C-alpha cells in the first residue's frame, strides 16, 4: 500500500503554502493564535535532531495545540497540526484535525486532497468503511479540478480498502510464536535467513553504537537448532564480517558456505568499512566459508552493483540466481524494484534485469525471497492491492518461466502496518518474520508460524554428507551436479568444502534426480534420487575412487525397461557424463559390465546382461570415444551385491525388491 499516495504536499510545500496564506490573511483574528501558529510552523525545522535528521514535530504540535485553544476554528492550525500528527505516525489525531478543517471550510478540500488523505489515514486506523466513504466523495464528484491522478489514486485505495475489509472477515488461522531467547533480545532482531537443512539461522541484530546515538549498529548473528528443536544462543559473525559500520539484509546459500549481504558507505559516501570498496551508496558484498573461517568480504563481482542503491539480496538454492532490490527513478520520484542476475561461467554475476511489471510497480518493492524450490517468490511491496502500508505477496513461476500475478498473503500476515522480510523455511511449512508486537523480548523480535497450505511453496529437503578418497579417506572438494531426469536440466551445482569435504545441497521434492559427484583424478560417483513420493532428507557419504584403482564404479542412472536391453532416455545424462569423463582422461580404458538379479533363467540373465553392457558400449562409441578404449562383458547373476540368503532375511517385500534392483545394475571399471 502507498504510505503517501494521497499526501502530495511535503512538509516544506505545506509550510510554503501557509506562508502564502499568511500574506492573504489567516482565518482567525486572534493575534496570539497567529503568533503561536507561526512558532509551531517553524519549530520542526528549528530543532532537527542532528543524530537522526528528524524534525521536532512534537514542539510544533505543542505550539499548534495552544493556538487552537485560542481559536478552535483556526483552519490553518488544524491543517498544519494534522500534517504534523501524520508525519509523527499518529493517524487518528491527524484524521480528527483534517475533518475539523473540512467542517470549518468545506472548500479547504484542496481539490479532493483532504478526502484522499483522510481515507488513507482511516485505512491505517482500520476504519475501512469511513475510508471508502471519503474515496467515494472523489469518485462521485463532477468537479473538474479533481485531477485524473487523484481519481486513479482514489480508485486504487478504495479497492485496497474493500480488500482489507474482506481479508479481515476471513483471517488466516496462524499463531505466531516467539522464536526464543537464544535469538531474541532487548535489541531489534530482523532479516532472518536459513540454510536448506533448517538448522542454521543467520539474522541481523541492531546493537548500541559506541557514540551513544539512538540508532544502533547492525551486525550479523548466527544460531543453530539443537536436538531439542530449540535455537541455541546466537553468536556474532567474526570481526572481518561485522564491522563498526552497518551490515544488513543477509542471504545465505543452501549449504551455509556463501553469504551475500549489504554494506553502505558512511556519510562521506566513500568509506564502506575496513578493506571494502564500493561503487556507490549501498552495495552487495560476498564472503565464503572455507572450513571454519570466513574470507574477507569483497564487492560482489560482476554487474550487480552500481552507483545507486542495491539491497535485500536473496540467493537461489542452486547458487546461480540472485534476486535483490535496486533503487530506480529520478531523485524526486524514486522507487525501488526487484532485479535478478544470473551467475556466469567465470563466477561473476551478469547484468541485472528487472522482474516484469506484474511484479514491479511504480512504487516501492522493498524485500524479496526466492524459496529453495526455485519457483516461489515472496516479496514486499506498497504498490499492489493490500491491507495498508507495505504488504507481503507471493508469485509462482510457471513451467515456461513466467512469474504469475502476485497473491497477497492476507490477514494477519499482513496488517495496516508495514510488513517486510518474510522467510519461508525449506520445508514450506514454517515461516519466520520480524515483529514488534506485545509480549516479545523487546523491540523487533523474530517469530515463526505454520504457513497455511495454500501459501506454501514446493517442499524442499536436502542431501548432505562427506566426499572423500575411497582409499586414503582424505576429504575432497567434490563437484556436485543434480539433474532433473525428466528434462535433463541441471538443477543444482555445488562443491564440497575444500578442507572438510562436507556438503549440503537442496533437494526439491516431486522429481526424480540423477546425481553426479566428480573430482580430478577420480572416477565420478553417481546416485539416483526418486523424490516423487519421498520427502525425507538424505544423508550419505560419497567415496571417490582414484582412476588408478580397478574396483567397479556403479552407473546408478542407467535405466532399461524390464527384461529389455534398450536404453531409456533418462540414461543419457549419465552416459554423457561417462563420455566426458573418458575424453577428459584420454589415457584410460574401461570395461563396461552388466549384471542381473538371480531370479529367472540363468542363460537368459547372462544374455540380457551382455546385451545391456553392449548397449552402453555402443552409445559411448557412437559419441566419438575410440572403440579400442572400451570393452564390455555380461556377468549375469554371478556377482550380486545382495545374496539370496541376505535377501531372504529381509522382513518386507518392498525391501526384498529393492535388494533385487540393486543386483540389476550397470558398472564400469578401469582396466590396465
Image: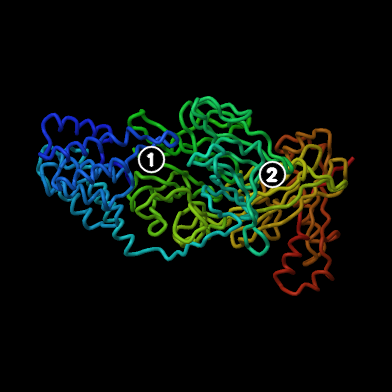
Q: Is residue 398 visible?
A: no
Q: Is residue 40 visible?
A: yes
Viewer-closest of 432 and 85: 85
- The image's colour scheme reads rainbow
What distance separates the C-alpha of mark 1 from that of mark 2?
Answer: 38 Å
User: Mark 1 and 2 residues: CB-CB less than 8 Å, in contact?
Assistant: no
Q: Which residue is at the front of the view, 49 or 466?
A: 49
Q: In this view, does 584 lie to the left or right of 270?
A: right
Residue topped by disc 1: 364
Which disc number belongs to residue 200? none
Q: State which quarter of the image contains the C terminus.
A: top right
**Residue shown at 73% from the left, 62% from the top:** 661
Where is residue 144 shown, x and y percent of the image? Answer: 11, 38
Q: Which dot marks residue 480? A: 2
Give the structural element (helix, strand or loop) at label 1.
Answer: loop
Q: In which image quadrant can residue 168 be found? A: bottom left
| Sooner in the amino-acid sequence: mark 1 or mark 2 | 1
Query: Mark 1 or mark 2: which is in front?
Result: 1
Q: Position of residue 518 (x, y in %)?
A: 74, 42
Amino acid at each position: 500500500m502507498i504510505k503517501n499516495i494521497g499526501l502530495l504536499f511535503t512538509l516544506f510545500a505545506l509550510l510554503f503554502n501557509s506562508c502564502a496564506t499568511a500574506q492573504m490573511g489567516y482565518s482567525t483574528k486572534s493575534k496570539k493564535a497567529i503568533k503561536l501558529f507561526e512558532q509551531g510552523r517553524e519549530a520542526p525545522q528549528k530543532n532537527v535532531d542532528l543524530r537522526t535528521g528528524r524534525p521536532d514535530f512534537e514542539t510544533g504540535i505543542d505550539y499548534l495545540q495552544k493556538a487552537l485553544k485560542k481559536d478552535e476554528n483556526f483552519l490553518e492550525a488544524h491543517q498544519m497540526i494534522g500534517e504534523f500528527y501524520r508525519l509523527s505516525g499518529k493517524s487518528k489525531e491527524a484524521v480528527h484535525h483534517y475533518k475539523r478543517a473540512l467542517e470549518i471550510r468545506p472548500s479547504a478540500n484542496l481539490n479532493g486532497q483532504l478526502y484522499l488523505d483522510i481515507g488513507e489515514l482511516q485505512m491505517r486506523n482500520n476504519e475501512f468503511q469511513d475510508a471508502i466513504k471519503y474515496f467515494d466523495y472523489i469518485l462521485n464528484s463532477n468537479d473538474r479540478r479533481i485531477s485524473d491522478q487523484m481519481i486513479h489514486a482514489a480508485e486504487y485505495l478504495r479497492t485496497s480498502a474493500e480488500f482489507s475489509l474482506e481479508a479481515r472477515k476471513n483471517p488466516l488461522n496462524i499463531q505466531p510464536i516467539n522464536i526464543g531467547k537464544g535469538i531474541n533480545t532487548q535489541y531489534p532482531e530482523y532479516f532472518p535467513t536459513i540454510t536448506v537443512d533448517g538448522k542454521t539461522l543467520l539474522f541481523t541484530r541492531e546493537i548500541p553504537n559506541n557514540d551513544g546515538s539512538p540508532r544502533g549498529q547492525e551486525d550479523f548473528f548466527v544460531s543453530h537448532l539443537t536436538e531439542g528443536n530449540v535455537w541455541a544462543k546466537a553468536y556474532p559473525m567474526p570481526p572481518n564480517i561485522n564491522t563498526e559500520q552497518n551490515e544488513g539484509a543477509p542471504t545465505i546459500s543452501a549449504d551455509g558456505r556463501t553469504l551475500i549481504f549489504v554494506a553502505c558507505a558512511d556519510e562521506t559516501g566513500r568509506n564502506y568499512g575496513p578493506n571494502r570498496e564500493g561503487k556507490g551508496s549501498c552495495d552487495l558484498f560476498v564472503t565464503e566459508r572455507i572450513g571454519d573461517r570466513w574470507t574477507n568480504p569483497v564487492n560482489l563481482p560482476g554487474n550487480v552493483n552500481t552507483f545507486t542503491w542495491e539491497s535485500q539480496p536473496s540467493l537461489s538454492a542452486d547458487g546461480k540466481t540472485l534476486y535483490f532490490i535496486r533503487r530506480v527513478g529520478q531523485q524526486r520520484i524514486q522507487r525501488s524494484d526487484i532485479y535478478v542476475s544470473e551467475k556466469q561461467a567465470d563466477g561473476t554475476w551478469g547484468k541485472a534485469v528487472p522482474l516484469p511489471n506484474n511484479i514491479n510497480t511504480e512504487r516501492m518493492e522493498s524485500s524479496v525471497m526466492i524459496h529453495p524450490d526455485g519457483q516461489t517468490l515472496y516479496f514486499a511491496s506498497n504498490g499492489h492491492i493490500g491491507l495498508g502500508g507495505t504488504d507481503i505477496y507471493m508469485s509462482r513461476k510457471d513451467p515456461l518461466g513466467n512469474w504469475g500475478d502476485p497473491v497477497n498473503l492476507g490477514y494477519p500476515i499482513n496488517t495496516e502496518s508495514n510488513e517486510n522480510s518474510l522467510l519461508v523455511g525449506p520445508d514450506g511449512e514454517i515461516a519466520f518474520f520480524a515483529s514488534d508486537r506485545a509480549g516479545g523480548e523487546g523491540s523487533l523480535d523474530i517469530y515463526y508460524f505454520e504457513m497455511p497450505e495454500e501459501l506454501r511453496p514446493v517442499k524442499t529437503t536436502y542431501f548432505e554428507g562427506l566426499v572423500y578418497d575411497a582409499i586414503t579417506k582424505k576429504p575432497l572438494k567434490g563437484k556436485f551436479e543434480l539433474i532433473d531426469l525428466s528434462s535433463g536440466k541441471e538443477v543444482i551445482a555445488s562443491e564440497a568444502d575444500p578442507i572438510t569435504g562436507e556438503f549440503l545441497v537442496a533437494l526439491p521434492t516431486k522429481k526424480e534426480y540423477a546425481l553426479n559427484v566428480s573430482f580430478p583424478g577420480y572416477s565420478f560417483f553417481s546416485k539416483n534420487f526418486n523424490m516423487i513420493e519421498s520427502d525425507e532428507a538424505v544423508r550419505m557419504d560419497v567415496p571417490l575412487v582414484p582412476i588408478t584403482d580397478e574396483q567397479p564404479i556403479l552407473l546408478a542412472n542407467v535405466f532399461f525397461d524390464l527384461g529389455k536391453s534398450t536404453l531409456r532416455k533418462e540414461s543419457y545424462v549419465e552416459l554423457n557424463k561417462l563420455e566426458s569423463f573418458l575424453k577428459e582422461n584420454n589415457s584410460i580404458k574401461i570395461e563396461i559390465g552388466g549384471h542381473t538379479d538371480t531370479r529367472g533363467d540363468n542363460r537368459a540373465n547372462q544374455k540380457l546382461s551382455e546385451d545391456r553392457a553392449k548397449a552402453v558400449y555402443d552409445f559411448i562409441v557412437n559419441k566419438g570415444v575410440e572403440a579400442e578404449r572400451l570393452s564390455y562383458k555380461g556377468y549375469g547373476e554371478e556377482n550380486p551385491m545382495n545374496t539370496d540368503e541376505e535377501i531372504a532375511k529381509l522382513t518386507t517385500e518392498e525391501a526384498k525388491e529393492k535388494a533385487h534392483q540393486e543386483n540389476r545394475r550397470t558398472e564400469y571399471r578401469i582396466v590396465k
